[in-house]
């Protein structure tokens, strides 16, 4: 692309006034953003484009003013391509964009809240204290869940089920990646249903707990009690992380009968999974087809606006003073999942309160060095080790250490392989950073992972996804 974009800080009241240049800028800009409007979400649009003021078009240089340097940087990092494409399409020739920061702009009004809409509070409060099973978390409600384009379908399905258990979508199958809010929504359904009807029997558990309970019942000869627990004494069965049932034949068998009994009695079944029914290895065909009876809803990673809204909501709940620019900074740079987003916020808040520092973007950069993979900046070895360790559940110190247990060794080899791919450091330099290993260890690791990626599709998927993540 031939266009370019530059930024300058300009706090002068108003430059030399050129009405023609200003009109030309306004015309071009208005036409260009009309086209963007359809491509970007409403929130992105309101947050980043509506506050922009076109100042002048002189030659092929368009000057735009925005009140926030941070917003400008965001546009440059995330939307420059789209923007230039549109401007070029409008003009029929390449165009350069110059951004100036005009702080005066903010006087005209508040910065729009980049947050997504949230679900209204539940209106069905019924007198009487609901009997909440102790393992249902009272904090995970629809109220505390931020809704955005990535999850609105899932939330709509869950709300329908919570309002009319057994009648809306039965079964409901919710699937999505780690840390995207599946467990939160399952609890929200439980909490909501209990509030509406305190007498309702809500059973929540993970599929692992279900498996253990079954094993226990079999050993203790307590199958009648087991069946009563999940059939007669259950109006809503919430089974989390059902992917763990794959390959567990006997548990699947029992779950199949539980499913049938509940379904016939018009009781609600709601399960979550990080995979689709047909992607769960060793998942029985007849269970698969059962899930086709109801609704399969997915939940996607949140967009930046939703991430910021989640941060703001968490901050408000936790009484953390989180300035808008910091929320936007975190939301822009932490993209993997909501759990990581929350973790970073809490780490930052803890650090700030311990050192009695204010929460600022500078502080965030400093405290979250290892977490943030800032686009454009290549991740360093420490970040790679941390990210790999998290994904493969091995502590960074073990990756750098000498233990040869298979899981640890695999994570170490993966981290070395990725370091080589991403940083292009030499073999001895990489060895050095992995706790002083010999260069031959790094070479072996690289060869081993290359070979394993051909043989082991799961490892291959892990490595590829880590590579994508680390490369932003
Ligand atoms: P999953 O079960 O999909 O792995 P969780 O439900 O455990 O994910 O979510 C991880 C954390 O992120 C939880 O603390 C949850 O409250 C929070 N979270 C996820 N999505 C949202 C959201 N849209 N709004 C508010 N909090 C969220
Ligand atoms: Mg979960």
Image: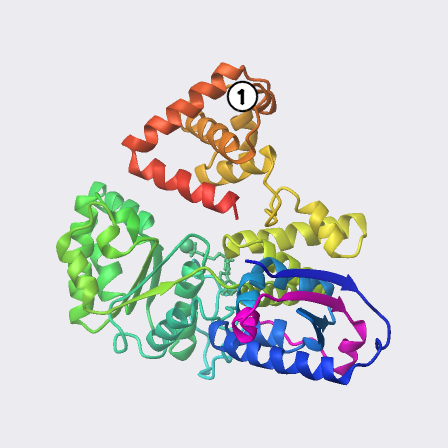
Residue 348, placed above or below residue 157: above
Where is 147 relative to 428, above or below? below
Q: Name the residue at the right extreme.
A: 12
Q: Quadrant where the N terminus lies?
A: bottom right
**Residue 434's quadrant in the figure?**
top right
Question: Viewer-proximal residue, 350 or 461?
Answer: 461
**Residue found at x 47% / y 72%:** 39
| Whether residue 456 is situated above or below residue 433 in the rendered picture | below
> Label 1 neighbourhood size at 10 Å, few (<14), some (14-19), many (20+)?
some
Q: Of 202 and 78, which appears nearest the observer?
A: 78
Q: Who's the residue at 18% across and 57% down the image?
A: 288
Q: Which region is colored magenta?
A: 86-115
Residue 48 among those drawn in magenta: no
In this view, 33 is above or below 224: below
In the image: residue 74, left or right of residue 235: right
Q: Is residue 369 visible?
A: yes
Tally of numbered discs = 1
For residue 321, which quarter of the picture? bottom right
Q: Please, what secondary structure does the residue beneath circle 1 have?
A: helix
Residue at screen point 62% across, 67% down: 95
Direction left: furthest residue: 286
Color scheme of the displayed model:
rainbow
Residue 8, position in %: x, y? 77, 62
**Residue 198 percent across, percent down from the top left:** 39, 75
Q: Is residue 68 left or right of residue 459?
A: right
In percent of width and height, residue 298 lies at 35, 64
Left or right: 303 as drawn, with respect to 165: right
- Left or right of residue 150, residue 222 in this image: left
Which residue in the structure is indicated by mark 1?
A: 427
Question: Where residue 173 sits in the image (x, y, percent)?
Answer: 29, 63
Does the segment drawn in magenta span residue 90?
yes
The foreground one among 39 and 7 is 7
């Amino acid at each position: 692309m031939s266009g370019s974009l530059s930024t300058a800080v300009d706090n002068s009241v108003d430059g030399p006034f050129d009405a023609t240049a200003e009109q030309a800028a306004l015309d071009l800009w208005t036409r260009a953003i009309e086209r963007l409007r359809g491509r970007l979400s409403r929130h992105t649009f309101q947050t980043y484009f509506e506050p922009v003021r076109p100042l002048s078009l002189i030659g092929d240089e368009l000057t735009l003013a925005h009140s926030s340097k941070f917003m400008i940087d965001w546009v440059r990092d995330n939307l420059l391509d789209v923007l230039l494409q549109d401007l070029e399409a409008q003009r029929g020739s390449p165009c350069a964009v110059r951004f100036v920061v005009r702080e005066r702009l903010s006087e005209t009004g508040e910065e729009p809240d980049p947050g997504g809409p949230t679900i209204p509070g539940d209106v069905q409060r019924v007198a009487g204290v609901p009997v909440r099973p102790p393992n249902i978390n009272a904090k995970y409600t629809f109220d505390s869940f931020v809704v955005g384009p990535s999850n609105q379908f899932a939330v709509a399905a869950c709300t329908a089920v919570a309002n009319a258990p057994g009648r809306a979508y039965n079964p409901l199958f919710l699937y999505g990646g780690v840390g995207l809010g599946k467990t939160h929504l399952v609890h929200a359904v439980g909490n909501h249903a209990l509030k509406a009807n305190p007498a309702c029997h809500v059973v929540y558990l993970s599929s692992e707990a279900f498996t253990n309970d079954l094993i226990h019942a079999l050993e203790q000869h307590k199958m009648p009690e087991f069946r009563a627990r999940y059939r007669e004494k259950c109006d809503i069965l919430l089974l989390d992380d059902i992917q763990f049932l794959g390959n567990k034949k006997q548990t699947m068998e029992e779950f199949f009968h539980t499913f049938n009994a509940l379904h016939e009695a018009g009781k609600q079944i709601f399960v979550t999974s990080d995979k689709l029914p047909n992607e769960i290895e060793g998942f029985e065909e007849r269970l698969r087809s059962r899930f086709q009876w109801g609704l399969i809803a997915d939940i996607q990673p949140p967009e930046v606006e939703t991430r910021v809204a989640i941060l703001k909501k968490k901050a408000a709940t936790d009484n953390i003073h989180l300035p808008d620019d910091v929320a936007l900074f975190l939301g822009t740079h932490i993209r993997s999942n909501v759990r990581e987003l929350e973790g970073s916020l809490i780490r930052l808040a803890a650090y700030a309160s311990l050192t009695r520092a204010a929460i600022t973007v500078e502080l965030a950069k400093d405290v979250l060095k290892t977490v943030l993979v800032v686009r454009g900046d290549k991740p360093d070895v420490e970040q790679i080790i941390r990210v790999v360790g998290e994904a493969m559940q091995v502590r960074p110190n073990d990756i750098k250490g000498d233990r040869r247990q298979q899981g640890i060794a695999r994570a170490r080899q993966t981290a070395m392989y990725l370091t080589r791919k991403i940083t292009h450091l030499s073999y001895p330099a990489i060895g050095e950073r992995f706790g002083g290993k010999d260069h031959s260890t790094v070479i072996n690791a690289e060869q081993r992972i290359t070979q394993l990626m051909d043989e082991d599709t799961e490892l291959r998927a892990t490595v590829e996804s880590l590579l994508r993540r680390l490369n932003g």
